[in-house]
Amino acid sequence: MSNDQDKIKNSKRRHADETAVKRQTKIAKDNGIPFKEPHKFAKHHATNCGNPHCVLCANPRKTFRELTIQEQRLFQDLDQIRDIKSNGSKPQE
């Protein structure tokens, strides 16, 4: 059932996984992070501590309680009418 294209796709996927593991183990060694099983870095980054409240690992928007650009647009003052086009030029009358 498997053809040559399936075999090539499988080998590319395996190669990508192996190179990702090698890259993360190199990062772990450079930073002095101990590890027993190098293949745990297949789906886990070496510098990620796993703590959701960590400033380095967490989402900065949630850590610093900043609004996203979409939320800023939603909450901006819509009562004030601005007579400026989107490019900043004054409208012609």
Image: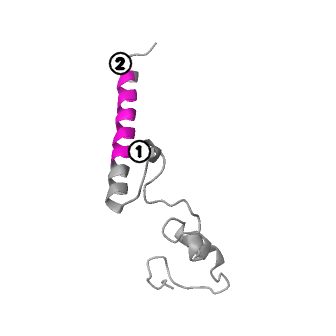
Magenta: main secondary structure: helix
Mark whose residue sits in front, 2 or 1: 1
Q: Residue at x 47, y 85 (%)?
A: 90
Residue located beneath label 1 in the image: 38
Compared to residue 79, the image places residue 7 above or below, namely: above
Residue located beneath label 2 in the image: 4
Q: Nearer the viewer, residue 1 or 25?
A: 25
Residue type at tag 1:
Pro
**Which of disc 1 and disc 2 is earlier in sequence?**
2
**Residue 36 visible in the picture:** yes
- The magenta-colored residue range is 7-22
Q: Is residue 6 left or right of residue 82?
A: left
Q: Inspect the magenta stretch and tell me whether residue 63 lies in it.
A: no
Q: Residue at x 48, y 46 (%)?
A: 43
Instruction: Tell me where residue 38 appears, x and y as whole percent.
Output: 41, 45
Q: Residue at x 54, y 66 (%)?
A: 58
